[in-house]
Amino acid sequence: MSQPPSKPDSQSPQNENGRPLDESLYAPTEEEDAFFSSQTGIKDAEERKQHILAVQAEAYKVHPYNCIRAFAFARLKISLFPWYKDLLRLGRERPGALFLDLGCCTGHDLRKAVADGFPVNQAIGADLHAEFWDIGHKLFKTTPETFPAAFITADVFDPTSLAPAPIPTSVPTSPLPMPLNSLTSLNPLHARLSVIHTSSLFHLFSEEKQLELAKLVAPLLSPETGSFIFGVHGGLEVKGERQRKNSHGIHMFCHSPESWKELWETQVFAEGQVEVQAFLMDRRRFGRVLRDLPERAQVSMLVWCVKRL
């Protein structure tokens, strides 16, 4: 039986633009507890909680994302997707398959995939804030040597990080610069990524910017059949803006499953190039803790996958 939400402590750590942190939102599942116990080496539950709270406070100072406040970095979101098994399968069966976690924050989703078998030397994290990746090493008590996945500091709207490119129709024949952790831009990855995961990213931007972002990300995907992009972010039954502002201070624009499907199938890719699946799910069913939201708050999440045919 769930406990009633506690009121945030006015002395709790907070960014000047964010709400106070509330440790009552920390509610890991048994699977998450086991994962973080194994990955951090901290076996005592209370010690592990205090470690995660300290990491949260540090991350929240970088930027007060609502997902950090809700402990999204301590949840096993990626393994809840119906396409997760396909990510792991490509890691096993496609030689040299590359996986990018775009907007990776602390890299928790990428680390889950690696823990479940995706080759660490073929995994890449990218985020605007390099501090989050460093905080991820603190969270998991690793170093770049003990966890050698690549990381790229990237502003997706800066062409030096990710330049516009045509949708690829063939696999590149030129070699990729190696090792991957020598990359300083996403641009060498055009047409080379077997899987891209990006969650809680698109809804940070306006409708126009979401389309621009989709057009920037799509050329990164390998044209090989079965390559795919997937993720989850805020959604609505009818596309439009939510009343509540996001951590960037703007009203969140949310696509509907229909408008999101139309965007990728007709505005980003050419007809017949991709298959798009998109559906709404209540955030509570997707592992998010929302006890501090009003009872009637709109909490739908758009779960989606864009797969090359």
Image (tube, rainbow, N blue to C red):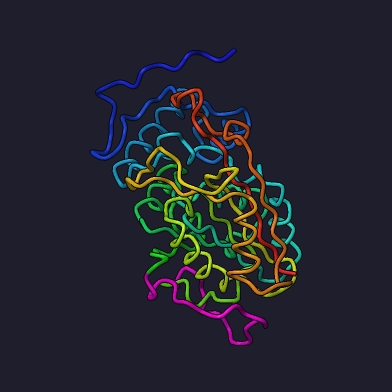
Q: Position of residue 189 (x, y in %)?
A: 53, 74
Quarter residue 161 falls in: bottom left
- Dividing the image into 4 quarters, which one contains the C terminus? bottom right
Front residue of 304 and 259 = 259
Q: Is 71 within the magenta?
A: no
In the image, is residue 179 above or below residue 256? below
The stretch in magenta equals 158-183
Q: Position of residue 244 (x, y in %)?
A: 40, 37
- Kindly identify the residue that appears in the image at 55 percent across and 51 percent down: 255
- Kindly identify the residue that appears in the image at 40 percent across and 25 percent down: 23
Front residue of 55 and 22 = 22
In the image, is residue 136 above or below residue 49? below
In the image, is residue 274 above or below residue 110? below
- Kindly identify the residue that appears in the image at 54 percent across and 55 percent down: 198
Viewed as shown, does residue 155 lie left or right of 224?
left
Quarter residue 141 falls in: top left
Q: Position of residue 291 (x, y in %)?
A: 48, 23
- Kindly identify the residue that appears in the image at 43 percent across and 72 percent down: 185
Q: Position of residue 120 (x, y in %)?
A: 58, 59
Front residue of 197 and 259 = 259
Viewed as shown, does residue 196 lie left or right of 227?
left
**Dominant secondary structure of the magenta stretch?**
loop
